[in-house]
């Protein structure tokens, strides 16, 4: 009887390991080039990763930014206020909160995002909610996105009223990878080792009033501009310290589109190791240490798992 119980336990353990591996790292050949190290970051058994950043405009700190990522297996997650039951794959969220003086007015902005990927790292759903408060006036915008094999379907709401919806075509997943704009900073750390791979990303174009005008499918490519670089300017747990030097790669991420013009690039400094007391220590996985987009900088302050 003990042998039978032991055999059953081994079979169950093997099944659990197989399910876990499938849930967090079974990408198609094209997508696996991008996500070949994703399971190392978000497929671990030590839980949800949380990255926190200080947000700076120039030299001035204006707020905070938090990104999370985790492997989920037959779990309930929230995307756009909707409970998604029995989800398996990768679940990303982010939260931004900034306050600053613009044109003599105090403007506070919060943004929250949620994205769900399946076991092959295909995006299933995404959601972005932005709340802006200026002189007592509140504006809430929401973008709800769903993905099929060849289309991105979106719905755009302002203060609860749907103003725009539509479909945007993208290349079939088997021939070209695609991701969502809402977790592009997370993916940046994977692009360092992805070679010349480019991916499709829906890009939101806004008019002069700040309302969504069109949605286009961008092509995103990345290039390592400097490798084995010294990464400075991080804060908190990753602040510049005497005797410790953070090392990694500087990455330029380009967004290009045929119409109506060129996209906007951002740079990301990916931290992969540090040197201290003449000893180099590799991090378990790369971290986005510094993200620069225009005159905004996100400076990493902490990394934790729960």
Image (cartoon, rainbow, N blue to C red):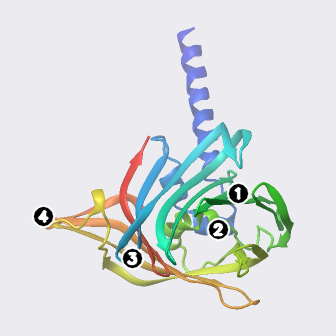
Residue at position x 68%, y 69% in the image: 30
Helix, strand or loop at disc 1? strand
Label at residue 181:
2
**Cα distance, mark 4 to mark 3?**
21 Å
Q: Position of residue 297 (x, y in %)?
A: 43, 73
Label at residue 277:
4
Residue mark closest to the camera, 4 vs 2:
2
The local crowd at label 4, few if under 14, some if 14 to 19, many if 20 or more residues have their Cα within 10 Å, is few
How many marks are shown on the rendered structure?
A: 4
Whether residue 288 can be seen here: no
**Cα distance, mark 4 to mark 2?**
40 Å
* Mark found first going from the N terminus, 1 or 4: 1
Residue mark closest to the camera, 1 vs 4:
1
* Mark found first going from the N terminus, 1 or 2: 1
Q: Position of residue 63 (x, y in %)?
A: 43, 62
Label at residue 126:
1
Is 93 left or right of 202, judged from the image as shown? left
Residue mark closest to the camera, 1 vs 3:
1
* Mark found first going from the N terminus, 4 or 2: 2
Label at residue 249:
3
The local crowd at label 1, few if under 14, some if 14 to 19, many if 20 or more residues have their Cα within 10 Å, is many
Q: Are marks 4 and 2 in contact (CB under 8 Å)?
A: no
Q: Nearer the viewer, residue 63 or 153?
A: 63
Q: Are marks 3 and 2 in contact (CB under 8 Å)?
A: no
Helix, strand or loop at disc 2? helix
Residue at position x 36%, y 55% in the image: 302
* Mark found first going from the N terminus, 1 or 3: 1
The local crowd at label 2, few if under 14, some if 14 to 19, many if 20 or more residues have their Cα within 10 Å, is some
Residue at position x 64%, y 85% in the image: 263
Q: Position of residue 235 (x, y in %)?
A: 30, 63
Q: Position of residue 181 (x, y in %)?
A: 64, 68
């Amino acid at each position: 009887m003990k042998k039978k119980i032991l055999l059953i336990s081994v079979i169950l353990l093997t099944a659990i390991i197989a399910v876990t591996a499938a849930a967090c790292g079974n990408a198609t050949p094209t997508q696996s080039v991008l996500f070949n190290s994703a399971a190392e970051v978000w497929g671990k058994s030590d839980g949800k990763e949380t990255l926190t950043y200080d947000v700076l405009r120039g030299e001035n700190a204006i707020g905070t930014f938090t990104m999370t990522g985790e492997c989920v297996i037959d779990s309930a997650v929230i995307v756009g206020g909707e409970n998604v039951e029995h989800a398996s794959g990768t679940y990303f969220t982010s939260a931004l909160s900034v306050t600053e003086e613009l044109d003599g007015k105090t403007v506070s902005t919060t943004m929250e995002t949620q994205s769900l990927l399946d076991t092959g790292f295909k995006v299933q759903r995404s959601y972005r909610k932005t709340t802006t408060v200026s002189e007592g006036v509140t504006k809430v915008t929401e973008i709800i996105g769903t993905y099929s094999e060849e289309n991105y379907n979106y719905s755009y709401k302002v203060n609860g009223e749907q103003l725009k919806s539509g479909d945007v075509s993208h290349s079939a997943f088997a021939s070209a990878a695609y991701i969502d704009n809402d977790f592009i900073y997370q993916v940046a750390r994977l692009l360092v080792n992805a070679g010349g791979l480019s991916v499709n990303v829906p890009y939101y174009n806004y008019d002069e009033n700040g309302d969504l005008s069109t949605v286009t499918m961008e092509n995103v490519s990345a290039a390592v501009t400097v490798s084995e670089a010294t990464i400075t300017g991080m804060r908190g747990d990753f602040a510049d310290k005497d005797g410790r030097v953070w090392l990694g790669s500087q990455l330029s991420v380009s967004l290009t589109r045929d119409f109506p013009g060129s996209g906007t690039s951002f740079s990301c400094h990916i931290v992969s190791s540090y040197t201290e007391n003449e000893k180099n220590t590799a991090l378990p996985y790369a971290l986005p240490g510094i993200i620069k987009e225009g005159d905004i900088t996100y400076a990493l302050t902490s990394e934790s798992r729960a």
